[in-house]
Image (cartoon, rainbow, N blue to C red):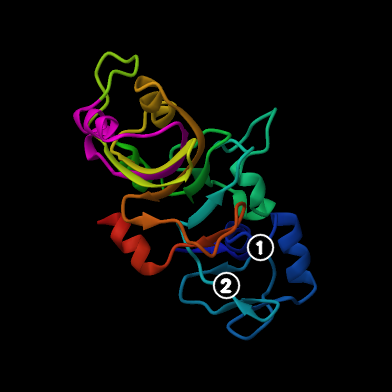
Amino acid sequence: MHLRLDKYLADMGIGTRTQVKQYIRKNQVLVNGLPPEGPQQKVTESDAIFFQGTPISYQKYKYYLFHKPKGCVSAATDNLHKTVLDYFPEPARKGLFPVGRLDIDTEGLLLITNDGALAHNLLSPAKHVPKTYYAEVAGTVTEEDQLQFAQGLAIGEEKQSLPAKLEILPPKSPEISRIYLTITEGKFHQVKRMFQAVGKQVLYLKRVSMGSLTLDGSLSPGEYRELTEKELQNLQE
């Protein structure tokens, strides 16, 4: 890899090419301990590049665990609503997209990346990647519902939904049930439609896991962190 220094730093989310050139002019960037010749200087992965004293290592792909809040859409751009990428600083957004989607009023785990191949594998219907949701549901969820979910439900598509695992938790109140539901598909509004099929309404929905990835309890809605090496390795397997 041989890149211009300004492109390298812009790719790493330090700023726009124009901003990066200013940083270089102001001696805020060092290459191998020395001020660079200019923004056009070629650098490689083996060069030690520092911005304002912090080492900047080149990463082709980025992977973020994001706690999606309610009220934003799972898209890179939208004219009407705030998007999940609006929670990332502008320079860092370049090339990023959410893997799959959560409804505007659903919160929870969303993977944000610029790795199209990994996204394709996670979303491929043939892979049956499990996704687990926590939900609060109006009324009493019963063992009968559990059996129906385990057999698959008619939700208005050509085919029934695939079998799903419904776990009933102690209720929130006499009127509100609490459950975990694990599905292996990602049809539009699927969880809500499955409960509608058994005559019930989802009041609150939160995705807590996707494949081997689990929502980090320390992240508040709207916060994110990079995946650990172990998390990434497990996902890629």
Residue shown at 32% from the left, 15% from the top:
157
Residue 26 is situated, as x and y percent measured from the top left of the image, at 80, 73
Give the residue pinned by disc 2: 56
Q: Which residues are magenta?
A: 125-152
Q: Residue at x 67, y 81 (%)?
A: 53
Whether residue 26 can be seen here? yes
Instruction: Give the label on residue 14, or none.
Output: 1
Q: Nearer the viewer, residue 164 or 188?
A: 164
Q: Residue furthest front?
A: 174
- Quarter of the image for residue 230 reads bottom left
Q: Position of residue 176 (x, y in %)?
A: 48, 38
Secondary element at tag 2: loop
Residue 113 makes an appearance in the image = no
Q: Is residue 56 left or right of residue 235?
A: right
What amino acid type should be assigned to the residue bearing mark 2? Ile
Q: Residue at x 53, y 47 (%)?
A: 96
**Quadrant where the C terminus lies?**
bottom left
Q: Is residue 25 magenta?
A: no
**Left or right of 102: which side holds 72?**
right
Residue 235, x across and y down, in percent: 32, 56
